[in-house]
Image (spheres, rainbow, N blue to C red):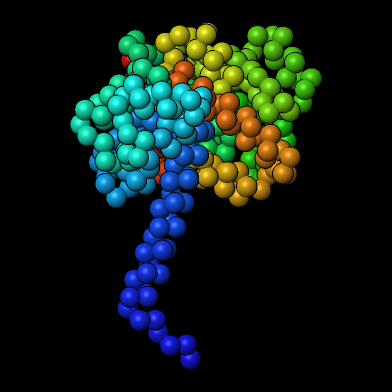
């Protein structure tokens, strides 16, 4: 039988484990910043609110270098202009330094502000595997007052998907006919493979009946809807973290390795466009994310 470790060794092992966990948490946080899953503003707020968080223990130079398009030279110039020592951690910044860093973040990475005069047309978009379909399905099953649009697609059904309920599964010839006849509000080729589009007539009928309409579409489609109806409310669904997004895509098991790599590259582009949206919601728990979307629908004006 192995002898028990003396108390001092137990403490050292526990401390080493905590240190490893903190390093991993900081590394994950830096990936989230680089991929735009987390905004610099939200990480700074977390550091100020929780002194024991990974955000609070993140060194300011590492924080800045993790932000998109901030190289070593630019990082050092920012530190100098904000009068922040390179040894400082986010949780150790003074009131003046926090204010200066927050103002710089707002100027460099402005956050979207909701617009007035929004319609009852809500658009839910986000990167691959973020769970748009799951959130939309939850809303359909629990909030019948909201009309969930059913998209047309040229891809094959996944296990459990039904024609007319989850998608209208059509071939390329039928999709071409729908485009030519003006039946689609928006359409796009996603991941360079399959085409998706939103039938126009059911949306017009639902809006005319006074209902709120929710479209669950991709980034290209959201941009087309905004162009067609500038008053539409655009909602961007975010994953809790980049690592979680990767795990969801792998765990889904519906794509091979080459397709997953292609989708992750697309996800980076999609995440970079989140500033075009009116609201951002993190899909950590499906019911909670769905509730927030529904609250936005209730706040919409006709």
For the question of whether residue 148 can be seen, the reply is: no
As displayed, is residue 112 above or below residue 260?
above
Q: Quadrant of the C terminus?
A: top left
Q: Residue furthest bottom?
A: 1
As displayed, is residue 15 above or below residue 273?
below
Left or right of residue 208, residue 133 in this image? right
Left or right of residue 175, residue 184 in this image? left
Q: Please name the residue shown 59% across and 19% down the image.
A: 220
Q: Position of residue 201 (x, y in %)?
A: 57, 15
Pick the residue in front: 238 or 92.
92
Q: How many marks?
A: 0
Q: Position of residue 244 (x, y in %)?
A: 51, 45
Q: Position of residue 250 (x, y in %)?
A: 62, 47
As displayed, is residue 121 above or below residue 157?
above
Q: Please name the residue shown 30% across and 26% down the image.
A: 83
For the question of whether residue 186 can be seen, the reply is: yes
Left or right of residue 276, residue 167 in this image? right
Q: Please name the residue shown 38% across and 42% down the image.
A: 58
Left or right of residue 23, residue 50 in this image? left
Quarter of the image for residue 104 reads top left
Q: Position of residue 198 (x, y in %)?
A: 59, 20
Pick the residue in front: 129 or 201.
129
Q: Residue furthest right?
A: 173
Quarter of the image for residue 153 reads top right
């Amino acid at each position: 039988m192995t002898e028990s470790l003396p108390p001092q060794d137990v403490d050292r092992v526990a401390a080493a484990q905590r240190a490893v966990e903190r390093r991993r948490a900081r590394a994950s946080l830096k990936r989230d910043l680089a991929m735009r899953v987390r905004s610099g503003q939200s990480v700074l707020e977390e550091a100020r609110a929780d002194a024991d968080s990974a955000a609070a223990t993140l060194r300011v130079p590492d924080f800045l270098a993790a932000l998109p398009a901030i190289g070593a030279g630019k990082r050092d110039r920012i530190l100098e202009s904000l009068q922040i020592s390179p040894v400082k951690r986010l949780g150790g910044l003074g009131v003046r330094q926090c204010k200066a860093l927050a103002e710089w973040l707002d100027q460099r990475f402005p956050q979207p502000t909701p617009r007035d005069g929004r319609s009852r047309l809500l658009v839910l978009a986000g990167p691959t595997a973020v769970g748009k379909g799951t959130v939309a399905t939850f809303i359909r099953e629990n909030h019948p007052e909201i009309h969930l649009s059913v998209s047309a697609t040229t891809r094959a059904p996944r296990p459990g998907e039904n024609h007319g309920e989850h998608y209208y599964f059509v071939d390329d010839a039928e999709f071409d006919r729908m485009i030519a006849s003006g039946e689609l509000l928006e359409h796009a080729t996603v991941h360079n493979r399959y085409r998706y589009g939103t039938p126009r007539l059911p949306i017009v009928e639902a809006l005319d009946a006074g209902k709120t309409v929710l479209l669950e579409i991709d980034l290209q489609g959201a941009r087309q809807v905004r162009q067609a109806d500038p008053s539409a409310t655009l909602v961007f669904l975010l994953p809790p973290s980049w690592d979680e997004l990767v795990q969801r895509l792998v765990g889904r098991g519906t794509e091979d390795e080459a397709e997953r790599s292609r989708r992750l590259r697309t996800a980076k582009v999609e995440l970079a466009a989140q500033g075009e949206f009116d609201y951002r919601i993190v899909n950590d728990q499906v019911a909670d994310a769905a509730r927030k979307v529904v609250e936005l629908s209730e706040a919409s004006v006709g």
